[in-house]
Image: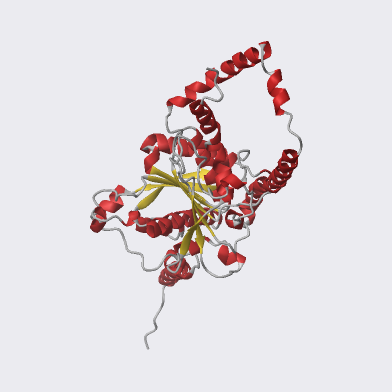
């Protein structure tokens, strides 16, 4: 009988081959598992993104989808969701292949060009998304559709994850205490980036948007630029509306109103005061008044004073206690004469009665807070909105117009400057 002898070298080669095959199979299984997890992830675009959304194509050159307010609101909300996911992808160390965020801007022919980083914890709180001409050309969209911005600055809100939660809540408390976010490093970064992008593309081709805390930053950054004469399209989803400072100011305004009413009941001494102003003292007050007005006359060279040029869009839900004060008729009530001028700039000879902001409110019945504050509702196919008035947003934007407008009104009436 013949006897087979197996070489030990051949056995080693067989074992190595088996190990290689096994490693390949395990690697394939991991890739398949990652793809399955990505496909079923609750934040995947095809899972929780907008439904029945038409992709951009050559027809948009004739009739742009971006001119549809619902489409624009949907896309911009998706861009903000992308910023949340850019930070989550960073925290969970996802690679470019399995990252969730890109799926939220690629369908709209945009690309990520810059991220805004909080130097305190390294977290990403905003991003610049720009029109992707190459991707558009691949789908025969030869030029940017009318109404589509060249660049969008999107700012996320509070993310309750340990790596960034501390700094997010710190800014939440900053707004709650002072109704201002100007002391935050994020305000400074966002303002500088938006200025730079506006210089590059022109303010009319740029948009800023935010959700929750991000909407608070977007409002104050947009307002800061408007004061400099730079008007950027602004979209605010569930912006914060409640603060201790606002409550105290509201109490102060009510107390002042009560005092004015009481004072109006007392005997007037105005005739005596007017008499004291006649003579040398009156001449002196006129000259002082003239000197104080000279520097302010230079501000009149901009005829429209910017009234109505910056009109932010606010999207709120009455069931969301964070932003519901925007629809509260008792919130920071103005005097009786202004009661029918909500959402309207202070009136004067320039831009009388122009809208200061556009407020859209969800018309659904009472909802739970997590649903009412969710960003997802703004791209929902059944979202029904109605336009409303808000005394709060008019008060927040009042400083944009009152200084120059009151000066202009008084000069036109000839009641302030000496003749």
Percent from the top left, x then y, of residue 10?
40, 71
Residue 14 lies in quadrant: bottom left
Query: Please, is residue 78 above or below residue 131 in the view?
Result: below
Name which residue lies at 60% across and 16% down: 286
Query: Please, is residue 187 above or below residue 157 in the view?
Result: above
Q: Nearer the viewer, residue 81 or 372?
A: 372
Name which residue lies at 70% across and 20% down: 275
Query: Please, is residue 213 above or below residue 362 in the view?
Result: above
Q: Residue furthest top?
A: 280
Percent from the top left, x then y, of residue 153?
46, 46
Q: How many marks?
A: 0
Name which residue lies at 60% across and 52% down: 240
Query: Please, is residue 188 above or below residue 128 in the view?
Result: above
| Quadrant of the frame with the N terminus | bottom left
Percent from the top left, x then y, of residue 85?
50, 57
Residue 54 shown left or right of residue 386 in the figure: left
Q: Residue furthest bottom?
A: 1
Is residue 19 visible in the rendered image? The answer is: no
Percent from the top left, x then y, of residue 250?
69, 47
Is residue 357 visible in the rendered image? The answer is: yes
Residue 400 shown left or right of residue 18 in the figure: right
Residue 278 lies in quadrant: top right
Q: Nearer the viewer, residue 412 or 323?
A: 412
Question: Coloring scheme of the render?
Answer: secondary structure
Residue 344 shown left or right of residue 129 in the figure: right
Residue 79 lies in quadrant: bottom left
């Amino acid at each position: 009988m013949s006897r087979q002898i197996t070489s030990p070298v051949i056995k080693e080669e067989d074992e190595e081959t088996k190990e290689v095959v096994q490693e390949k199979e395990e690697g394939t299984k991991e890739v398949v598992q990652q793809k399955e997890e990505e496909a079923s992830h609750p934040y995947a675009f095809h899972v929780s993104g907008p439904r029945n959304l038409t992709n951009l194509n050559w027809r948009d050159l004739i009739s742009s989808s971006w001119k549809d307010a619902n489409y624009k609101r949907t896309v911009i909300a998706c861009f903000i969701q992308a910023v949340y996911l850019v930070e989550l992808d960073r925290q969970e160390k996802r690679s470019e292949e399995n990252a969730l965020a890109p799926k939220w801007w690629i369908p709209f022919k945009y690309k990520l060009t810059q991220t805004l980083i909080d130097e305190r914890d390294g977290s990403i709180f905003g991003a610049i998304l720009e029109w992707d001409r190459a991707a558009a050309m691949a789908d025969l969209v030869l030029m940017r559709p009318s109404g589509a911005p060249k660049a969008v600055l999107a700012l996320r809100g509070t993310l309750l994850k340990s790596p960034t939660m501390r700094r997010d809540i710190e800014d939440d408390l900053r707004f709650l205490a002072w109704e201002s976010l100007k002391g935050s490093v994020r305000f400074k970064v966002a303002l500088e980036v938006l200025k730079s992008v506006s210089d590059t593309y022109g303010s009319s081709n740029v948009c800023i948007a935010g959700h929750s805390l991000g909407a608070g930053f977007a409002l104050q950054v947009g307002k800061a630029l408007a004061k400099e004469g730079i008007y950027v399209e602004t979209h605010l989803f569930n912006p914060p509306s409640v603060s201790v400072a606002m409550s105290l100011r509201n109490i102060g305004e009510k107390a002042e109103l009560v005092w004015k009413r009481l004072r109006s009941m007392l005997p007037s001494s105005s005739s005596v005061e007017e008499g004291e102003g006649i003579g040398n003292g009156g001449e002196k007050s006129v000259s002082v008044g003239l000197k104080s007005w000279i520097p302010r006359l230079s501000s009149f060279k901009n005829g429209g004073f910017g009234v109505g040029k910056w009109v932010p869009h606010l999207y709120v839900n009455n069931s969301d206690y964070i932003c519901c004060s925007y629809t509260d008729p008792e919130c920071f009530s103005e005097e009786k004469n202004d009661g029918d001028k909500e959402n309207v700039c202070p009136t004067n000879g320039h831009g009388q009665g122009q809208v200061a902001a556009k407020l859209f409110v969800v018309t659904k019945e009472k909802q739970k807070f997590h649903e009412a504050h969710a960003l997802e509702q703004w791209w929902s196919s059944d979202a029904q909105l109605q336009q409303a008035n808000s005394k709060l947003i008019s008060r927040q934007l009042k400083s944009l117009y009152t200084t120059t407008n009151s000066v202009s009104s008084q000069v036109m009436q000839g009641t302030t400057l000496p003749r």
